[in-house]
Amino acid sequence: MKQPLYNTGVLFKTLIKRDWLKLIFWILAMLAFAASGAGKMEVVSNPKTAGTLYTMFVKNPAMVGLFGPTPITHPVNYSLGPIFGQTMTLITGLTFAIISIIYVVNRSRKEEDDGITELFRSYSIGKIANTTALVIELLLLHLILAVLLSLSIQAQDVAGLNHLESNFLFAFTTSAQGFLWGMFALLFGQIFSEASTTKGMTFGLLGLFYIVRMLTDVTSLSIGWFNPLSWSYLAFPYVKGHENWLAVFLTFILAFLLLGISYILELKRDVGAGYFPERKARLRGKKGHFGFPGLVLNLEKKMIIGWLLASFVLGLVYGSMFGQMDHFISSNKTVKELFVGNETAASAIRGNFMVTLFSILSILIAAFGVILLTKMVSEERKNRLEALYALPLSRLKVYSTYLLTAILSVIFAQFLALLGIFIEQLGNKNTLSFLEIMKSGMIWLVAVIFVLAILSLLLGLVPRLAELIWVYLGFLLFMTYLGKLLSLPKWLENLSIYNYIPKLPVEKMNLSTVLFILILSVLLISLGFGAYKRRDLITG
């Protein structure tokens, strides 16, 4: 086909017909995530509360590393708008980016792996028509999402968040991140020959940029302009005199530059191929690869090693924040006024920081476990398990292998992250013991195992709805990140499993609650296996 864009319109209509329900759900979920907190934040906008928040979120470098910076230099100016802008911009941009990466990889490289793209190419379809249709869909989706998000915040008519231009700036800077990271995924999809590698490399780059911005935000904010992820908040929406559309323009310019490179690479390669050659297989397999558990570990070892390494590095970065926080406590007079005595202040702030840090860290590691466990369904859809079941292989072995692989992997990942934190903070004045960090951090694995238990139940009962676990993970992140700040209803807090985990070292250990959650998890896993044992295998 000489015309590379031939029949792009036909493929675009096909994409919309396939995904219209998913796209509507995506828009509604993102609106609920990003706009629902606007009205609730009025609670924290009074001068006394805002002054305390200014001390904790603006002056504390550890919290700046988590939430992002703000140019506000006086607590009087830290009103509802800047509070919303600082706490919501980065997390919203990250959420849009993650969903875009998953969607683009599934609709581009994954379809090449499954042979769908090759089937399209057998008709009168241009070589980059499918990619162009996907890009148009993604761009329109984020433009619509930006407009609806800004109008949704505006419609709430909350003082400080009722400036339409500021709402548009917030909406477009976060939506632009979604489109940008979709283009990063598209580019890596041309370079690598597998969907899993493409997704892993894109998320790896996103994680690298996130870690780099944590370091630059507390040292030199100007360096952040060299980090595309930092553009999500360097526009500083809702901060009068500092609002800047340049970050939005730079994001779209880079996105279209990546698109142009992706076009060039796709036009020069064959369907299903990549620019990195696949490693040749061994003539004889290792002994550890024999048997089904060995097969699963061999297939997932790259991703597991990558996540374990990333968890340790993230732990090192988070550990460096403890030193910054100790300096902040000892040098800030306001902190001493808020708490009785410097030592009490240090214990209280450090304890609450550990709760926030370890809970967010465990959600990221839970995502790792979810990816591993959902591999069972993805292999099932590709008819690979059906071939294996022709051998003397029980469903119990398949189910338990994927589940144990996920559970053991998240345990190791959490341990390595906490080990990184412990090692990095060893040189601090107020060094935390290894046991204290491990006890406060490993307790969150109870919630992670519960999330995997819910997923195992979905995989057994309704595998086509297994993706809903990502909605619950997003809800957990939202509640952990901003739940207390927004003073949300109690019934909504009770839907989060993290609400029941003992917040060590701030709270005392509640062994009965922990045991109940673990027993409930085992029950859900058992019910999931019972359903998986009886249901038919899914295909396609």
Image (spheres, rainbow, N blue to C red):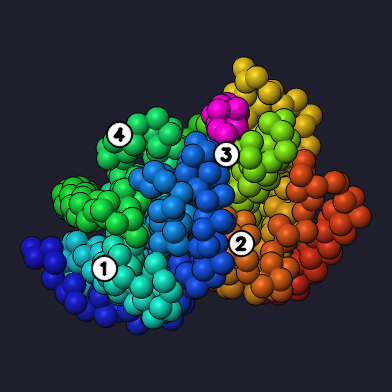
**Residue 34 appears left or right of 107:** right
Mark 3 or mark 2, earlier in chain:
3
Q: Is residue 140 above or below residue 478?
A: below
Badge number at residue 483: 2
| Dot 4 or dot 2, earlier in sequence | 4
Real-space CA distance between mark 2 and mark 1, rounded to the nearest whole angstrom: 27 Å
Whether tag 3 and tag 2 are in contact, CB under 8 A, the answer is no
Within-10-Å neighbours for mark 3: few <14, some 14–19, many 20+: few
Find the magenta span and give its range. 319-333
Tell me residue 420's x, y (percent). 61, 28
Location of residue 27 in the rendering, given as x and y in whole percent from the top left corner:
41, 74
Position above or below: 103 against 187: below
Which label's residue is closer to the chain start, 2 or 1? Answer: 1
Of tags 2 and 1, the one toward the viewer is 1
Which residue is tagged 3? 334
Name the N-terminal-most of marks 3 and 4: 4
The residue that label 4 is drawn on is 223
Which of the two discs, 4 and 1, labels the residue nearer the N terminus? 1
Local packing at callout 1 (Cα closer than 10 Å; few below 14, some 14-19, many 20+) is: some
**Which residue is at 8% across, 63% downward?**
2
Residue that protrudes farthest toward the top in the picture:
427
Q: Is residue 98 visible?
A: no
Indicate the amino acid at tag 4: Ile
**Element marked by disc 3:** helix
